[in-house]
Image: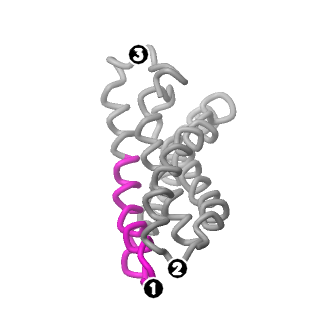
Amino acid sequence: MAALFGVRADFGDAFVAVLLKVGFGLAAAAAAAPLLLELARPNTRARHVAIPAFLFAAASTAIAFLAFLVTPAEARMESWLGGGVPECLYRIPLLAAPIAIALFLAVRGLGPTRLSLAGAAIGAVSGSLAAIAYASCCPMDSALYVASWYLAAILFCAAVGAVLVGRALKW
């Protein structure tokens, strides 16, 4: 990751903010991993293990909304967008791709039967792990930015996983 994007120049000063973003990625991975473990096997019901993933997404959305409301109006767009197109929207999926390939190779031999859902879980886990790696180079630290754009990048990885990985899992 550092070879691709470098490490932020103020890493030492922003260490706590980086740790909070790492915590966000860890929480997302912890919410999605049980779903992946359940969907990796044949003929499973994933309802009970999907709850943490949905709660994480709902909590992140609520945090983003509350952060938007408490941010002063003149600073909202800068806090939300970071001065341009959020780079995490393409950097997290880029970092997630090799992780998704590794998870695909691990899961395909287990015989999943709910292929699109298993692909989505692979995408969500790989996106969450990529968000952890990306945290050390991301210059934006606002809760509004992280809760909205990191979540959007992880959900994008899940959507791509549902379509591409789900099709590749056919046996």
At label 1, which amino acid type do we have? Answer: Asn
Residue 10 is tagged as 3
Q: Nearer the viewer, mark 3 or mark 2?
A: 2
Left-right relation of 54 to 81:
left
Quarter location, residue 163: bottom right
Q: Which residue is rendered at x = 65% and y = 28% of the image?
A: 83
- The residue that disc 2 covers is 113
- Span colored in magenta: 24-52
Tell me if residue 146 comes above or below residue 38 in the rendering.
above
| Viewer-side residue, 161 vs 91 | 161
Q: Nearer the viewer, mark 1 or mark 3?
A: 1
| Viewer-side residue, 120 vs 136 | 120
| Viewer-side residue, 163 vs 90 | 163
Is 160 contained in the magenta span?
A: no
- The residue that disc 1 covers is 43
**Where does residue 96 sit, x and y in percent of width and height?**
52, 44
Going from N to C along the chain, the mark reached first, 1 or 3, is 3
Q: Which residue is rendered at x = 47% and y = 42% of the image?
A: 130
Residue at disc 2, secondary structure: loop
At label 2, which amino acid type do we have? Answer: Thr
Label 1: how many Cα within 10 Å (few below 14, some 14–19, many 20+): few
Q: Which residue is rendered at x = 36% and y = 40% of the image?
A: 22
Q: CA distance from mark 1 to mark 3?
A: 49 Å
Label 3: how many Cα within 10 Å (few below 14, some 14–19, many 20+): few
Left-right relation of 153 to 24:
right
Quarter location, residue 77: top right
Going from N to C along the chain, the mark reached first, 3 or 2, is 3
Residue at disc 3, secondary structure: loop
Q: Are marks 1 and 2 in contact (CB under 8 Å)?
A: yes
